[in-house]
Image (cartoon, coloured by chain):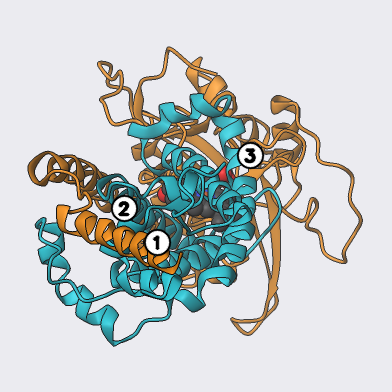
Amino acid sequence: MALQSLDIQRRSATTTPQPGSRQPIEVAKLIDVTTCIGCKACQVACSEWNDIREEVGSNIGVYDNPTDLSAHAWTVMRFTETEAHGRLEWLIRKDGCMHCADPGCLKACPSPGAIIQYKNGIVDFHQENCIGCGYCVTGCPFNVPRLSREDGKAYKCSLCSDRVAVGQEPACVKTCPTGAISFGSKEDMKDIAATRIDDLRRRGFDKAGLYDPEGVGGTHVMYVLHHADEPALYANLPANPAISPMVSIWKGVAKPLATLALAGVALGSLFHYVMKGPNEISKETEDEIDAEDRREREDKEAAQ
Amino acid sequence: MIRDPKDIKRYNASERVNHWIVGISFILLALSGLAFFHPAFFPLTQLFGGPVWTRILHPYAGVLMAVAFLIIFIRFFRLNLMGKKDFEWLAKARNMVDGNDHDMPEQGKYNGGQKVLFWSLGVCMLLMSVSGILMWRAWFHFPVELVRVAVVVHAACGAVMIGLILVHVYAAIWVKGTIRAMWYGTVTRAWARQHHRGWYRQITGK
Ligand code: HEM
Ligand code: SF4
């Protein structure tokens, strides 16, 4: 779905500039993990607004339900019980696309226009251009995109780009009963986070902090964590996420250079032919073959 | 069809068909693979019925090529074992490319250059097949760290292979009288004598 009211920052597999004469503000969603009660109202709002419904699964002994992101579940609550700090803590993280400033999915995508990063920071999959190769899965440092078994397209949280485009907040934000999710300009979200982090620090969570990882240029979904020094506690949230060096090599300058080298080999061959001429049978060899034939004929005649 | 009874048989029909299957599937793979390699080549997807079909078909063509190549490999690897003469040939290859093949050492059915190409393609084919399977998300779910290595290997080997095949095809065009070996399987005695003298002797006893 192309949203003409949103200007484009980056477009997958496209090497020319994008429409960008407008200067929209950078937005962000702030998820305050310390205020979340794990009610999953946001999951429900997400499936309602986006008209997606994961098949009813079975209880695996924990609260996680659905147990993983899928083409039909763009956000899931991940529950962790830990005694890392001397007492039982129940950590609940709302997982989904982080809307990276430097998105690995978009970098990896080979299909023009299948992944769009809007100027406001939202990274959106345009499924009508998706070819189903799964390169976005290979590129994402957060293990977010999911290929659908039914239609072979990749899906993930859109940060409700359709709602944001018309000045509304994402569905999950709208619905959260505890106010754990806020949405607005990235600057404002950082301010709200700072206030909350101060509060948490005063209450004994001296490692409380904001998760807005530098390695991917910052994200447009940020977390307030009680233990910002140990993000892995929260269902393996990566401490230093970044686009894998393998992905950078894969999508780096080597490819245009290899293309030039191949063109060089093809043109080199052409010019070799033009300059050196074909490699034909030499007169010498032809004479030798003729001589062989003559000898054979003479031998035969002599035998008769 | 026999053109000159004295022509020398170089490939039988089954070997030729085998080679054409590898060749055609390679061209399809190179064109469809390049479409994902860089946006400049994305329009190549139109040759295969659109981008989604290109993505679907490419790995199956890969399986076909891998099987056909394996058969050709088993058929010809013994003839491509490298010997002292091959290294001598390689040391002088520059003269040959320069257009002077007078003092090249005598070669058997394949020369040093062809043998190097054979083994390079063998290695590339193996790497392409393994990495291709690792990347094939329609069927497989390998750990993402492994897939990230595979995509680099697949793209790099693909580029190397396309380069090797360009040289292979050009060599066949450059050396006159070669391409017919893949059309009807025979070469002239003069061709064999000039380019593969050792083989010529072995076949004709001269
Ligand atoms: C041997 C069996 C092969 C298999 C199983 C295979 C499989 C794949 C798969 C799964 C992809 C990802 C796109 C898709 O899902 O269609 C891919 C991409 C590609 N393939 Fe293959 N392939 C094989 C052989 C080849 C060969 C012989 C070439 C020829 C040069 C080639 C060139 C490429 C290229 C250039 C890409 C794009 C890589 C990139 O995105 O950087 N492949 N292949
Ligand atoms: S979290 Fe993954 S899917 Fe979301 S923008 Fe970053 S790389 Fe793309």
Check residue A301 in the rendering and tell me which mark sits there, or answer none.
1
Total marks in image: 3
The amino acid at mark 1 is Glu
Q: Is residue A56 left or right of residue A7?
A: right
* Distance from Cα at disc 1 to Cα at disc 2: 53 Å
Q: Identify residue type, mark 3.
A: Ile
Badge nearest the viewer, 3 or 1:
1
Judging depth in this view, the residue of B122 and A236 nearest the camera is B122
Residue for badge 2:
B163
The yes-or-no answer for disc 3 within 8 Å of ligand 1 is: yes
Q: Is residue A230 left or right of residue B56?
A: left
Q: Chain in cyan?
A: B
Q: Left of A147 or right of it: where is B20? A: left
Residue receiving disc 3: B56
Q: Which chain is orange?
A: A
Q: CA distance from mark 2 to mark 3?
A: 25 Å
Task: Count residues near mark 3 (Cα–Cα under 10 Å), then give few for <14, some for 14-19, many for 20+.
Answer: some
**Which chain is indicated by disc 3?**
B
Q: Are the residues flagged by discs 3 and 1 from a single subunit?
A: no
Residue A292 vs B201, above or below: the answer is above
> Which chain letter goes with mark 1?
A
Ranked by sequence position, the earlier of labels 2 and 3 is: 3
- Helix, strand or loop at label 2? It is helix
Q: Which one is in front, A36 or A158?
A: A158
